[in-house]
Amino acid sequence: MEKSSIAQRIRAFRKLKGYTQSELADLLGVSIAILGAIERGTRKPDNKMIQNISQVLNIEPEELVAVIAK
């Protein structure tokens, strides 16, 4: 399965901010399995999860869902 853009961006921002999957999952109040599935692209985050992730990582939600125009 091809990784979704949002999955790649969540993982990249998590690493950029210095969080492990376990640390971010704890801050979000979800299991590491759920966060791992989101980062692999096998589970699509809902709008509330996107809001939570962006708040914890101190970024705008648009930075996770931004589509690069060609």
Image (tube, rainbow, N blue to C red):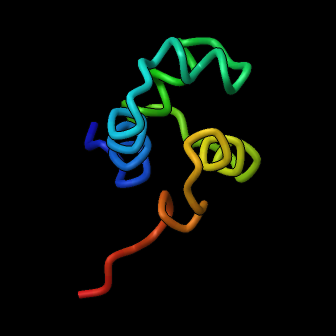
Q: Which residue is at a point 67% across and 47% down the rendered structure image?
A: 55
Against 3, residue 61 (above or below) is below
Q: Quick one: 41 or 21, which is closer to the camera?
A: 21
Horizontal arrangement in the rendering, residue 19 relative to residue 57 (left or right):
left
Q: Which residue is at a point 47% across and 25% down the rendered structure image?
A: 37
| Picture quadrant of residue 13 | top left
Against 22, residue 27 (above or below) is below
Q: Position of residue 29 (x, y in %)?
A: 73, 20
Q: Quick one: 40 or 17, which is closer to the camera?
A: 17
Q: Which residue is at a point 28% across and 36% down the rendered structure image?
A: 1
State how many labels appear: 0
| Picture quadrant of residue 61 | bottom right
Q: Position of residue 35 (x, y in %)?
A: 53, 24
Q: Quick one: 49 or 60, which is closer to the camera?
A: 60
Q: Which residue is at a point 59% across and 62% down the rendered structure image?
A: 60
Q: Position of residue 33 (x, y in %)?
A: 53, 12
Against 26, residue 48 (above or below) is below
Q: Position of residue 12 (x, y in %)?
A: 32, 42
| Picture quadrant of residue 28 | top right
Give the quadrant of the C terminus.
bottom left
Against 21, residue 15 (above or below) is below
